Image: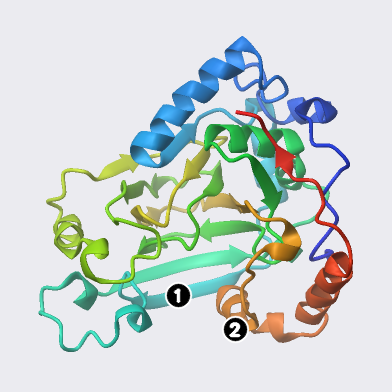
Amino acid sequence: MQSLLRSRYPSTCEPAEDPAIANIVDTARYPIHELDGTQAAATIAKARAAWETYGEVSLPGFIRADVRALLADEVSGLPAHNRRYTAPYLARKSLGSNASLDPEHPLRRLFQSDIHAVAGDQIPNATLLRRVYDSPAVAAFFARVIRRGRLYHYADGLQQLNVMYLLDRGGRSWHYDGSDFVATLMVQQADEGGDFDFAPFIRTRCGGGGGDAENFARVRELFDGAYAGRRTTRAEAGTVQLFNGCRSLHRVRTAFGPTARITAVLSYDSNPPCAQQLPSLEANVRNYGERVRDSAVWLRAQEERRRLCAGVESPPPFETEG
């Protein structure tokens, strides 16, 4: 069993301390080891422009072509929890009962999701994917693009690194994320379908909260296929996407064919581990299944967190000066 809260905080987080990442990341195209260089500055400036305009950055070819097949093979067929459900795009508890709403209100519409989620403790430590997530150079590059002074690994060992499978006819319905930043890696694209749709900044603020902030009229246009601001991308294997999902409504269209669509979700936080807000037991059970209730999984994670945070100063972040 994997350690659910492994120590990933070296004494310093300078990109130059991670030269081996060049065996996985195409550093000729993305010079993450030289963030103050001229080429990196141009790459970061272009990425920032997309981030600030659309809340989304696509980095095609981030993973070297010669290791993509191995990366996919290492994370294929891992134990996964099938999340299959039908629900509105916002949780009913957010805005009360939907029964009194207009029949055409977007909250009255139901959408089906069918995905298979691999929790972080099921992803072997030796995989290339783990090396990408653990890399301080990768994290520092992401921080520079989105103008974060520092990034920490997410302290919940189940959610910090996930693999998502969309099998034949699987999809992920319209939804918002709980955070304003997430990094995803396209490990393997589906034979057909699996495109990513999003509506940049259709929500006024993260968390919504109802009322004008949710912009229901625009959401209705989106669901009706009439919203001019919708964007669609189809990432190829090796592409990294940085995304602001708490304000941009998004979905993954139905995938078709025998080749699974495989993505990895890399989660970071602006707060040090002992100051982060972590999910509850019930939230992780919904995400990864009843096995999480096993003391060998959940209680071990809690014990590791207590040990890390008991009278210990917060470890150094992945710092950047951009």
Residue 11 in the image, given as x and y percentages of width and height = 88, 41
Q: Residue at x 65, y 13 (%)?
A: 37
Which quarter of the picture shows residue 312?
Answer: bottom right
Indicate whether 248 appears above or below 131. Answer: below
Q: Is residue 20 left or right of residue 89?
A: right
Q: Which residue is mark 2?
A: 282
Residue 304 seen in render: yes
- In the rendered view of the protein, which quadrant contains the N terminus? bottom right
Residue 122 seen in render: no
- In the rendered view of the protein, which quadrant contains the C terminus? top right
Residue 44 in the image, given as x and y percentages of width and height = 53, 24
Disc 2: CA contacts within 10 A as few (<14), some (14-19) or many (>=20): few
Q: Which residue is mark 1?
A: 84
Q: Residue at x 79, y 73 (%)?
A: 301
Q: Nearer the viewer, residue 276 or 65?
A: 276
Disc 2 is placed on an element classified as: helix
Q: What's under tag 1, amino acid-wise?
A: Arg
Which quarter of the picture shows residue 31?
Answer: top right
Q: Nearer the viewer, residue 118 or 301?
A: 301
Q: Residue at x 62, y 79 (%)?
A: 280
Q: Residue at x 43, y 36 (%)?
A: 51
* Mark toward the start of the polypeptide (1 vs 2): 1
Indicate whether 106 appears above or below 315. Answer: below
Q: Nearer the viewer, residue 2 or 42?
A: 42
Q: Is residue 124 left or right of residue 205?
A: right
Disc 1 is placed on an element classified as: strand
Q: Is residue 319 left or right of residue 218?
A: right
Q: What's under tag 2, amino acid-wise?
A: Glu
Residue 102 in the image, given as x and y percentages of width and height = 10, 79
